[in-house]
């Protein structure tokens, strides 16, 4: 255990899981130690990464300034939970090891808590990077509008980028931390459960981080899998949260919509694989809820001319952006 653990506890514990990011984590850590707010500890969790020798070589110059945890692979949820349990701060701040913070991030977030001590959870805007020439703010692609309440998170009126989140540790512990059984969207699941518990959320529209998107192997690569995960979590809420009738109606309506969008994404995958009959059935089932004329045309085209590649590609281009509103 680093000697820094004998010091008085910091206010903030920065939690950084690492898996196959040896080439990126130095920039991440440099952004942490460039913060104008300095009352923090930085916890790096090596989540059973196959690039451990390279990772530990990169981390060597930082070891006197970080808490380094090495564990068997438990995916990001397990890594974050381990760090939260060992965190000494009253607050936890999340940062993925392929993302970076702007220098005033922690200062700005902690000022929000100082201005309103009743807050439990804050997040901010960020810049999406990784696609040269197409960088844009996170909230331009995934807006936050109005109060970030339980229902706003369910219907995705508010979207939360994890690498900007600072929260009271107790608020997350009280709802059971990240669900390690979920293959995807475990952050969304935790945010919703935290909001449902009555925690008070707030956000800033100021860009405070840089988020790397489209990295090969990242969990957000497959839209179909993301839609499936989102739908599964909504079904989980229906089973496990003691909702009132109004909240349950919101969740049930959203679950039906996301199931339809999942079927549409699966249909598009079948179409790309030239499995025309399977694509037609999935798109038709999705359109039973979505009621889109473009999808009706796609189903008709797949019925009468499944081998006409040019026509199929025309229909595919019409529907490929049909599952809008899914999480980034």
Image (cartoon, helix red, strand yellow):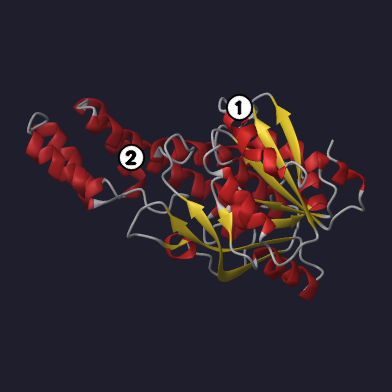
Task: Name the residue at 40% across, 37% down.
Answer: 222
The image shows residue 198, relative to residue 70, as above or below, that is below
293 to the left or right of 201: left
Q: Which residue is mark 1?
A: 53
Front residue of 263/199: it is 199
Front residue of 36/111: it is 36
Q: Position of residue 96 (x, y in %)?
A: 59, 46
The image shows residue 248, relative to residue 207, as above or below, that is above
Task: Name the residue at 69% across, 36% down.
Answer: 45
Q: Position of residue 22 (x, y in %)?
A: 56, 37
The reply to whether the C-beta atoms of the residues labelled 2 and 1 are less than 8 Å apart is: no
Give the class, few, some or many, for how many residues have Cα within 10 Å of label 2's Cα (few <14, many ≥20). many
- Residue 178 seen in the current view: no
Secondary-structure class at tag 2: helix
Q: Position of residue 121 (x, y in %)?
A: 71, 60
Label annotation for residue 233: none
Q: Which residue is mark 2?
A: 264
Figure quadrant of the N terminus: top right
Give the class, few, some or many, for how many residues have Cα within 10 Å of label 1's Cα (few <14, many ≥20). few
Secondary-structure class at tag 1: helix
The image shows residue 138, relative to residue 66, as above or below, that is below
């Amino acid at each position: 255990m680093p000697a820094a653990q004998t010091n008085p506890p910091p206010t903030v514990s920065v939690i950084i899981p690492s898996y196959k990011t040896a080439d990126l984590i130095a920039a991440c850590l440099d952004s942490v130690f460039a913060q104008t707010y300095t009352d923090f500890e930085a916890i790096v969790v090596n989540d059973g990464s196959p690039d451990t020798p390279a990772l530990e070589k990169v981390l060597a110059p930082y070891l006197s300034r970080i808490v380094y945890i090495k564990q068997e692979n438990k995916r990001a949820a397990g890594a974050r939970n381990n760090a939260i349990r060992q965190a000494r701060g009253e607050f936890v701040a999340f940062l993925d090891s392929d993302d970076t913070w702007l220098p005033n991030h922690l200062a700005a977030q902690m000022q929000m808590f100082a201005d309103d001590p009743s807050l439990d959870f804050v997040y901010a805007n960020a810049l999406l990077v990784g696609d040269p020439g197409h960088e844009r703010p996170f909230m331009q692609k995934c807006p936050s509008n109005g109060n970030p309440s339980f229902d706003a998170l369910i219907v995705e009126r508010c979207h939360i980028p994890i690498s900007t989140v600072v929260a009271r540790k107790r608020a997350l512990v009280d709802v059971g931390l990240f669900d390690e059984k979920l293959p995807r969207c475990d952050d969304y699941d935790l945010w919703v459960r935290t909001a449902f518990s009555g925690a008070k959320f707030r956000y800033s529209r100021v860009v405070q981080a840089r988020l790397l998107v489209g990295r090969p192997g990242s969990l957000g690569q497959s839209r179909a899998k993301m839609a499936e995960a989102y739908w599964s979590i909504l079904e989980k809420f229906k089973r496990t949260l003691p909702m009132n009738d109004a909240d349950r109606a919101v969740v049930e309506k959203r679950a039906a919509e996301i199931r339809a969008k999942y079927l549409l994404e699966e249909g598009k995958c079948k179409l790309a694989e030239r499995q025309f009959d399977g694509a037609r059935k999935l798109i038709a089932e999705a359109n039973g809820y979505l009621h889109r004329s473009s999808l009706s045309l796609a189903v008709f085209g797949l019925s009468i001319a499944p081998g006409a590649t040019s026509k199929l590609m025309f229909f595919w281009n019409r529907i490929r952006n049909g599952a809008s509103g899914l999480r980034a």
